[in-house]
Amino acid sequence: MTRLTFLGAAGTVTGSRHLLETRGKQLLVDCGLFQGRKELRLKNWDPFPVAPSSIDAVMLTHAHVDHIGYLPRLVKEGFTGPIHCTEATAQLAQILLMDTAHLQEEEARWANKRGYSKHHPAEPLFTRRDAERVMNHFQPVSYGTHFEPVTGVRGKFRDVGHILGASFLDLKTTQSRVEKKIVFSGDVGRPTDTLLRPPAQPYNVDYLVLESTYGDRLHEACDPVEHIARAINEGLERGGVILVPAFAVGRAQMLLYVLREMQEDGRIPSDVAIFLDSPMAVEALSLHKRSIGDLNLTCRKQYLHGIDLFRPRNLNLAVTKEDSQKINDVKKRAIIISSSGMMAGGRILHHLYERLPRAENTILIIGYQAEGTRGRSLVDGKESLRMFGEDVPVLAHLERIEGFSGHADYEEILAWLLGFNRAPTRTFLVHGEGNASQNQADLIRKNLRWDVSVPAEGDHVVLDF
């Protein structure tokens, strides 16, 4: 008997964790942090639903924190097995986990300094030392390479776009007369991504665990590059700076690529100072430059013609704390890219603290904002944001551009599913807020007539696998 239990990302877009019990072993697919609303964040402090020491292997679809961020706690609490993923995911995970640990430590330090924590003293969820211990567990493989997480099960990662190294996980039985296959989609990228290849096509799928982040939305039909060019030019005319909260992995590098192209096409001025203020984004930038072979054909052709893909004119990389602080002296004609993308923590908070109360500045939101995050509060029109124990007034001009999302919308998901050579026996929708998952389920039933369900956290199903 094989049992699949949904331990996270069920009814929410964070905390992706799926437990597969098969052949007397326990396999964990993704191991993410819960983010967003306080009641979700508090789940990170709960004991893990199963003993970490009982888990035999972990498999990661990609390196975003909502898919990998709990790994340091899992190892600290007794997990000793291998962590399977792609090469780029392992490298990005190292960057992201160390940065997340640093943010945890900084948040605890600030809470103790300002006295706004209910816990005395405030403690980080995990430390940088905890994150370092995770690295010895990684066993990375290339796309399409077979590995065996447990005897009788063949695993394989295939390119799914979204971010560098992201994949869907293909698990197939190898010891029965009739092969069975489970696919975990991870986060499905867009077919026309600026940097990455379109998602590969699964086939012969018996069970599908599918994300539904954009299950009730379509991306803007207008050209997002035109939108961002207009937003930048109007922001410069107001006499302030443009502040872009961006995910340090993927979105920040995409922005640099787009800014360079807009400069070359004359859509935005070339003399504007551009700051990339995120040590993690700078590290991820280096990895992107070393991973040209994983980018799409357009990017590879440009690289062959000698184009420095991610270097717009007047680019300044802010790595040290002092580099970041100096940006506060810049009052106009500048674009500041900083993380985190949902404004949950990191250097972006200090820039928001400085820039939000001034009407000449522009906050440019280009990514999904989960419920309960500061980014969602901005999008929802809140008049102030809570930061560092203070309510900071929102007077800056707000622009929202969704066309750069790394997630496929529901039509793109449906088009991807149409490429399956047959209907899965069962499909489970995860990684979506309630309305999104239910709407996507309805669309799949209507258009494809598949058996689709939306599990709740803690639900389990028995599979013929």
Image (cartoon, rainbow, N blue to C red):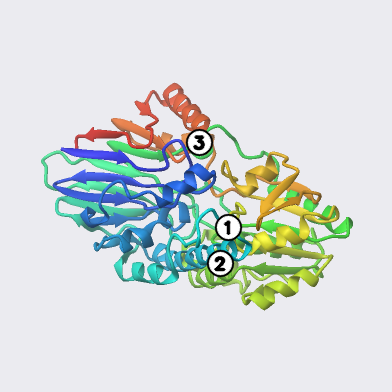
Circle 3 Cα neighbour tier, 10 Å, few/some/many (<14 / 14–19 / ≥20) = many
Please identify the quarter of the rendering in which residue 183 is found. top left
What is the spatial separation of the Cα atoms under label 2 and label 1, in whole angstroms? 23 Å
* Residue carrying label 3: 433
Q: How many marks?
A: 3
Mark toward the start of the polypeptide (2 vs 3): 2
Residue sitting at 58 percent across and 71 percent down?
Answer: 279
Residue sitting at 21 percent across and 40 percent down?
Answer: 180
Residue sitting at 23 percent across and 57 percent down?
Answer: 53
Q: Which element carries disc 1, helix, strand or loop?
A: loop
Instruction: List x then y, in percent, for residue 333.
Output: 83, 65
Q: Nearer the viewer, residue 176 or 106?
A: 106
* Residue carrying label 1: 247
Mark toward the start of the polypeptide (2 vs 1): 2
Mark 2 in CB contact with mark 3 (< 8 angstroms): no
Instruction: List x then y, in percent, for residue 355.
Output: 77, 59
Name the disc covering residue 109, or none: 2
Instruction: List x then y, in percent, for residue 426.
Output: 31, 31
Mark 3 in CB contact with mark 1 (< 8 angstroms): no
Residue type, mark 3 in image: Glu
Q: Which element carries disc 2, helix, strand or loop?
A: helix
Residue type, mark 1 in image: Phe
